[in-house]
Image (spheres, grey):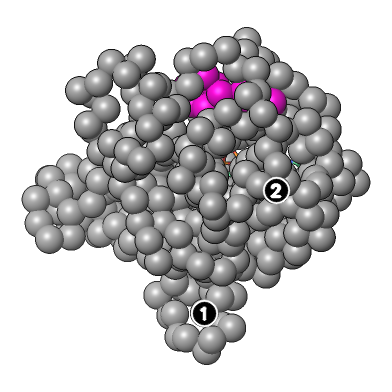
Amino acid sequence: MSCLVKTNYSHQLSSTAMAMCSSFCPQIPNQLRARPICPFPTKPLFTLSVKAFSSETSSASSKDGLSARIGFLGLGIMGSPMAQNLIKAGCDVTVWNRTKIKCDPLISLGAKYKSSPQEVAASCDVTFAMLANPESALEVACGEHGAASGMSSGKGYVDVSTVDGATSKLIGGRINATGASFLEAPVSGSKKPAVDGQLIFLTAGDKSLYELVAPLLDIMGKSRFYLGDVGNGAAMKLVVNMIMGSMMASFSEGLLLSEKVGLDPSVLVEVVSQGAISSPMYSTKGPSMIQSMYPTAFPLKHQQKDLRLALGLAESVSQPTPIAAAANELYKVAKSHGLSDQDFSAVIEALKAKLQNPPK
Ligand SMILES: NC(=O)C1=CN([C@@H]2O[C@H](COP(=O)(O)OP(=O)(O)OC[C@H]3O[C@@H](n4cnc5c(N)ncnc54)[C@H](OP(=O)(O)O)[C@@H]3O)[C@@H](O)[C@H]2O)C=CC1
Ligand SMILES: O=CCCC(=O)O
């Protein structure tokens, strides 16, 4: 396993100096290329070839990745800002989204558009996908006019959606069958880190593709982990989100209990924020939860999906996860109250809701 972390050294360099470093000094450590920028005209400098993936060329991978033609499929809460950061960094980006109108702001920023994942993959060297769930990730990669139909040897597919390992392996197998390379790279971090280029990538799969796209991951994120075989990135992401879902459910209980016993829940948030269980999640979401407001950063339906997938992962190795199982039930109740598209912090509403058929 390896991890690289973005630092702020770039603030000491002008953007031109950074661009020159990224383009001409591949020996400069990744940490010093914290914000790779490709300000030159976006025409591809070359067509990505099998050679570009070979380990001998990995030392020049930042140049290759930055000059690649990049496809981006799925422009929701996360995909949009991620693609936007690539465009703003000067990369050559082609977008597609099921609902076409979401492509328009990116097209205005300079992105190209293709009308199917197949066409995006066919016209790009590396294609990223950020989709809702296993079903949509499979559909976009392997369905009719899916990305796999546009893939061939020398290209790469990077799935950054949160899915289970089995789905990821299926997609990877289908991509590899075309001769192309596959990397799973789900992200930790939500809407704001996506906007700020501060995501954490949990990657697994083709190591050469990982090295090739590393400069692109560094534009969108603050750190990246390479975890080995396909499935490990998905598993790491599900474990992290299993913990997060349980934390949020427990926090919700605490907020409501504090209020019921006459305490000020805002003071609880403050107390929690100063102690050993402090978490940015509590201090950022707490104040709006107290006001019963749930502006969506991470949709509740996705959190429930991740708990469901994490429970499947636990089942596959007979690991007891009673806390996560209970939390999952709470998110299911919240969904049944129509809260799927609210932020996952709306799970607190499931604890407030009156039972529809209260026991006599
Ligand atoms: N939001 C967050 O904080 C985080 C989310 N994630 C994960 O990232 C992924 C995306 O999340 P997010 O951006 O929040 O989700 P959104 O719901 O905002 O976006 C989902 C995307 O998937 C597309 N999509 C859904 N179903 C289909 C389908 N059947 N065919 C084609 N496209 C489809 C949507 O297209 P359309 O616009 O047409 O609906 C949209 O582009 C999820 O796996 C989520 O778990 C990971 C980290 C953080
Ligand atoms: O999958 C969503 C994760 C959200 C977060 O890490 O804050």
User: Closer to the observer: label 2 or label 1?
Assistant: 2
Q: Residue furthest front?
A: 56
> What kind of residue is marked 1?
Ala
Would you place residue 48 above or below residue 99 in this image?
below
Pick the residue in front: 240 or 16.
16
Q: What whole-number distance in Å separates the C-alpha atoms at marks 2 and 1?
A: 38 Å
Q: Residues within 10 Å of mark 1 (few under 14, many from 20)?
A: some
Tell me what residue is drawn at x 51 percent, y 67 percent: 228
Q: Callout 2, which amino acid?
A: Val
Evaluate if marks 2 and 1 touch, with contact meaning CB atoms under 8 Å apart.
no
Q: Name the spot of residue 85 as percent of width and height, x first.
A: 48, 26
User: Could you tell me which residue is drawn at 71 percent across and 32 percent down?
Assistant: 47
> Residue at coordinates 51% horizontally, 48% vertically from top-left?
58
Disc 1: which residue: 314
11 shown above or below 199 = above
Residue that carries the numbered disc 2 in the rendered image: 50
Q: Which residues are magenta?
A: 84-94
Residue sitting nearer the eye, 58 or 204: 58
Q: Residue at x 79, y 25 (%)?
A: 114
Quadrant for ligand 1 reads top right
